[in-house]
């Protein structure tokens, strides 16, 4: 990208995120990387001149390591810029501080966060690396969009290095209430880090309000509405704090869902499952926040109670491998696999498997065929910033059939009132909603699906990015 003037209208865009949208695999070379952020951002940047700074997933070796080609140019001419990280940095910053402390704390402390001072030191050092890299390569006056909980110190660090930049930060995960956030030993540093941005975006209004309350409580600042005025050596500066609920590229999913190979594959999936009357589906990264165990318990009990018949109903759970070096993720995998094998052992018979469980990443086309095949989608997180899977399912239901069972504790629930909303801690309630969704009259399913689809298409990812960027550019 060529340097431009200091005006921010139509300024070049620099994305700073923990991961690049590609990862290096020794056998296949560079390939697209999975994950919610990548799915969302890739589609936004496809048509725009931009630079993406992030880690590639490979470790920096002390001796330089084997010869590996630099990351390819991304879609639409996006330049990819790799921040090299050592194994020790990834352990302290990513597996430790980000995923052992911040991730569980921000998700209601579903599992106990573990705070290690040395891991936070590494977190700070790695945040500095990202900030320095962004400061080196960002064109004059660029918009810099920093993403997510791994990089919360970057906005302030970057502002100190490059006051000419316009800096936005977006948190993809929940932001917890005062009572929970207060336990974070580094709460001041995190709040000050985020306030280095001109715009701090969250998935929901509740998250934005939590942040504003915390700023008042721990930094003694007095937010006025969604604005916080911070005093700096160079004068005072206003930070905007707002909700920008993320969406998906809805039309892409609908188009793929309507293609003949997808429709044929969906029919084949149904045949392979033994032509059941009802297919229930779950799709998640294998993460303890997603409530995979909740829905397995609920469906298993429905089979046990005789409300669902394993001869005519099949539950398919896709659980994509995730963060396998973090201990709690090994535990949730064991828990889920025990529940599945117990249920199948107790309830199945030769040729009848009530729960199909796939622990493997899946191509997007295959995932789309699953959405097309599924009669009821089960999305039951204990806490989730937004959740894209429920939106993808809805986008794929081009015939306006099917039902969505959705946890109240997802950001998506604020928008998707016509889902069967459930409290995932109430197993009886989840069971009731699964039955209601599975046995709804066609007119009722259609009424709900039509309304859900309207929302998902209206609030798609382009709109999310356009809203965020126009606000960052200084729009009112
Ligand atoms: C974070 C926040 C927020 C999953 N398995 C496969 C696969 N996926 C894709 C899904 C979806 C994405 O990954 C998962 O997105 P989610 O939103 O459900 O969850 P997180 O990964 O936790 O994302 C979340 C999101 O950021 C965006 O802001 O919504 O709250 O936690 O797109 O389809 N894709 C493919 N194969 C798989 O096996 N191809």
Image (spheres, rainbow, N blue to C red):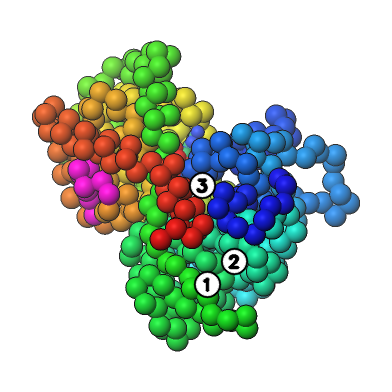
- The answer to whether mark 1 is within 8 Å of ligand 1 is no
| Crowd tier of the residue under label 3, counting other residues whose Cα lies within 10 Å: few below 14, some 14–19, many 20 or above | some
Q: Residue at horizontal 66%, vertical 36%?
A: 77
The residue wearing badge 3 is 37
Q: Which residue is mark 2?
A: 155
User: How far apart are the alpha carbons under marks 3 and 1?
Assistant: 22 Å
Where is residue 9 shown, x and y percent of the image? 55, 53
- The residue at 44%/41% (across/down) is 462
- Mark 1 and mark 2 in contact? Answer it, CB < 8 Å: yes
Q: Is residue 304 above or below residue 141?
A: above
Q: Report helix, strand or loop for mark 3.
A: helix
Give the residues drawn in magenta, as a range. 415-424
Which comes sooner in the sequence, label 3 or label 1? 3
Q: Nearer the viewer, residue 74 or 86?
A: 74
Residue 423 to residue 214: above or below: above
Name of the residue lying farthest toward the right: 63
Residue 141 x %, y %: 64, 59
Disc 1: CA contacts within 10 A as few (<14), some (14-19) or many (>=20): many
244 left or right, relative to 303: right
Query: Is residue 412 visible to the viewer in this orientation of the structure?
Result: yes
Q: Is mark 3 within 8 Å of ligand 1?
A: yes
Identify the main secondary structure in magenta. loop
Residue position marked by numbered label 1 in the rendering: 195
Indicate the quadrant where residue 22 lies: top right
Q: Spatial distance from mark 3 to mark 2, Cα to Cα? A: 18 Å
Q: Earlier in the sequence, mark 3 or mark 2?
A: 3
Asked whether 417 falls inside the magenta stretch, the response is yes
Say which of 140 and 218 sits in front: 140
Q: Secondary structure at mark 2?
A: helix
Q: Nearer the viewer, residue 349 or 448?
A: 448
Check residue 463 for magenta coloring: no
């Amino acid at each position: 990208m060529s340097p431009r003037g200091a005006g921010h209208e139509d300024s070049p865009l620099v994305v700073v995120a923990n991961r690049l949208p590609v990862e290096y695999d020794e056998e296949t070379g560079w390939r697209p990387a999975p994950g919610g952020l990548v799915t969302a951002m890739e589609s936004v940047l496809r048509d725009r001149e931009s630079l993406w700074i992030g880690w590639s997933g490979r470790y920096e070796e002390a001796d330089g390591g084997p010869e590996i080609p630099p990351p390819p140019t991304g879609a639409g001419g996006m330049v990819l810029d790799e921040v090299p990280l050592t194994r020790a940095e990834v352990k302290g910053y990513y597996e430790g501080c980000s995923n052992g402390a911040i991730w569980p704390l921000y998700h209601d402390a579903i599992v106990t966060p573990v705070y290690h001072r040395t891991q936070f030191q590494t977190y700070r050092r790695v945040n500095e690396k990202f900030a320095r890299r962004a400061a080196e390569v960002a064109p004059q006056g660029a918009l810099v969009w920093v993403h997510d909980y791994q990089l919360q110190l970057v906005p302030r660090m970057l502002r100190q290095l490059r006051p000419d930049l316009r800096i936005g930060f977006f948190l993809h995960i929940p932001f917890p209430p005062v009572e929970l956030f207060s336990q974070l030993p580094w709460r001041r540093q995190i709040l000050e880090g985020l306030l280095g941005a001109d715009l701090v975006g969250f998935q929901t209004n509740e998250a934005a309000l939590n942040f504003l309350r915390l700023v008042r409580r721990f930094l003694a600042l007095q937010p006025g509405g969604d604005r916080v005025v911070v005093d700096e050596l160079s004068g005072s500066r206003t930070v905007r704090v707002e909700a920008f609920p993320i969406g998906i590229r809805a039309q892409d999913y609908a188009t793929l869902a309507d293609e003949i190979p997808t429709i044929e594959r969906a029919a084949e999936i149904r045949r392979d499952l033994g032509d059941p009357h009802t297919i229930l589906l779950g799709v998640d990264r294998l993460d303890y926040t997603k409530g995979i165990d909740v829905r397995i318990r609920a469906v298993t009990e429905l089979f046990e109670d005789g409300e669902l018949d394993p001869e005519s109903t099949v539950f398919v759970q896709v659980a994509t491998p995730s963060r396998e070096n973090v201990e709690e993720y090994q535990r949730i995998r064991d828990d889920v696999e025990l529940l599945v094998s117990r249920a199948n052992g107790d309830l199945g018979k030769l040729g009848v498997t009530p729960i199909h469980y796939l622990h493997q990443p899946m191509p997007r086309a295959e995932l789309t065929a699953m959405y097309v095949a599924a009669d009821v989608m089960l999305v039951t997180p204990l806490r989730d910033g937004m959740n894209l899977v429920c939106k993808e399912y809805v986008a794929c239901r081009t015939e306006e059939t099917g039902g969505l069972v959705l946890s109240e504790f997802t950001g998506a629930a604020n928008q998707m009132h016509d889902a069967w909303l459930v409290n995932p801690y109430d197993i009886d309630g989840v069971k009731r909603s699964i039955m209601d969704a599975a046995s709804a009259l066609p007119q009722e399913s259609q009424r709900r699906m039509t309304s859900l689809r309207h929302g998902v298409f209206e609030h798609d990812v382009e709109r999310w990015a356009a809203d965020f960027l126009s606000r960052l550019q200084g729009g009112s």
